[in-house]
Image (cartoon, rainbow, N blue to C red):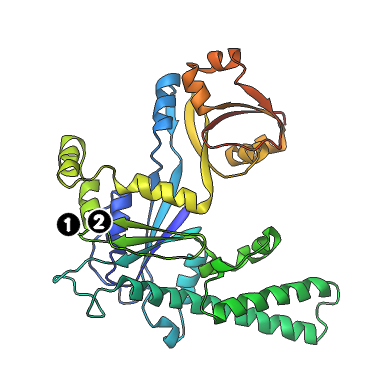
Amino acid sequence: MKLGIIGLPGAGKTTIFNALTKGTAPVGQSMGGRFEVLSAVVDVPDTRVDVLTTMFLPKKTTYAKVTYVDVAGIQKGASEKGGLSGALLNHLAGLDGFLHVVRAFPSDLVPHPDGSVNPARDLAALDTELLFSDLVTVEGKLARLREGLGKGAFKAGKADAQAELALFERLHETLSAERPLRQMELTAEEEKLLRGYGFLTLKPVLIVVNIGDDQPEIPFAYETPHSLVTHLRGKLEMELSQLAGDDLELFMTEYGVTELSLGRVIALSYDLMGLQSFFTVGEDEVRAWTLERGATAVEAAAAIHTDLAKGFIRAEVVAYTDLIELGGMAGARHAGKLRQEGKTFVVQDGDIVHIKFNI
């Protein structure tokens, strides 16, 4: 999973990036509209991996991974100056989803570029930039489809071209009404067709309301499908991310922080993206893998290695809770909880899976 941290200048994007990745990137420095990227891969916190490691004592433990990308260069009003740059668009299109940081904290040291703090205004402003970018892409595609159909260029696939034209006309209607593409009801086939376009307003988005150290959460609604809202005390969380042991515990107690932001943001991101974790265990390695909810056993095999999917015979599966309650594989097998499943078995969050295959 690769998530882009976006927002207007001064929103605290790099602060949130540092908080989530334990990074030390300089903050409070405007890129002046230049396209720059910071990237970091972090482990997905999961106590189940820790418990399984204690149980199996493997040579190696591997957590699931998530990549966070701090994307600079998005400016309010870019749509009035020709839109987002090609390099920025290409990068944004390749991300799985966005963490949109919205500023809610006041600061005399870092005044808001617009002279006042207004999270709803800032959110709408960046949404407009993303929407305009998608609209330009849709209008270009519509022009090519209409021209091609008019000249008879789709003789072999005229019906497909006409269906695609109808779909893009729906996209245009939605965007022209200033609504993100996330609000559209699309079939699985339509979603697959649109995947290669990297539409920005089609991507899931977690709105991160960046509040001050002593600031309470503010009422904030963002009612679009495939979106969630959370609050973070960005500066405080960044400082806490640099601590460990007794110092960390002391400061978390002092500020009433029950958990660091990374675990909460990842959990929300998994929900938003429709993802889950399954595990492989053994003496060599205990490992967490990321999989779409509703995916099958053969898709889980492919997530581990394509050869396992090609030569799939069956999957041995036991639920994490059953494995722990029964004290291990032997107990699960004796109780009949270690099951033999075929290709179409739907893997559940927390399943321990062992793939039997033959190449």
Quadrant of image for the C terminus: top right
State the residue at coordinates (36%, 77%): 75
Horizontally, is 91 left or right of 106 in the view?
Answer: right
SS for dot 1: loop
Is residue 247 placed above or below 125 in the rendered structure? above
Near-viewer residue (359 or 190): 190
Residue 249 image position (x, y, % from top left): 19, 38
Q: Amino acid at mark 2?
A: Arg
**Secondary structure beneath disc 2?**
loop
- The answer to which quarter of the image holds residue 192 is bottom right
**Residue 275: x percent and y percent?**
52, 46
Gap in angstroms between the C-alphas marked 2 and 1: 8 Å
* Residue pointed to by mark 1: 214
Q: Is residue 209 left or right of residue 216?
A: right
- Looking at the image, which residue is at 19% across and 69% down? 106
Residue at 59 percent of width and 41 percent of height = 303
Mark 1: which amino acid? Asp
**Residue ID for mark 2:** 233
> Is there a contact, CB below 8 Å, between mark 2 and mark 1?
no
Q: Nearer the viewer, mark 2 or mark 1?
A: 1
Q: Which mark is residue 89?
A: none
Q: Where is residue 100 drawn, in percent x and y?
A: 39, 64
State the image quarter where residue 310 is shown: top right
Q: Is residue 63 visible to the viewer in this orientation of the structure?
A: yes
User: Vertical placement of 347 versus 324: above or below?
Assistant: below
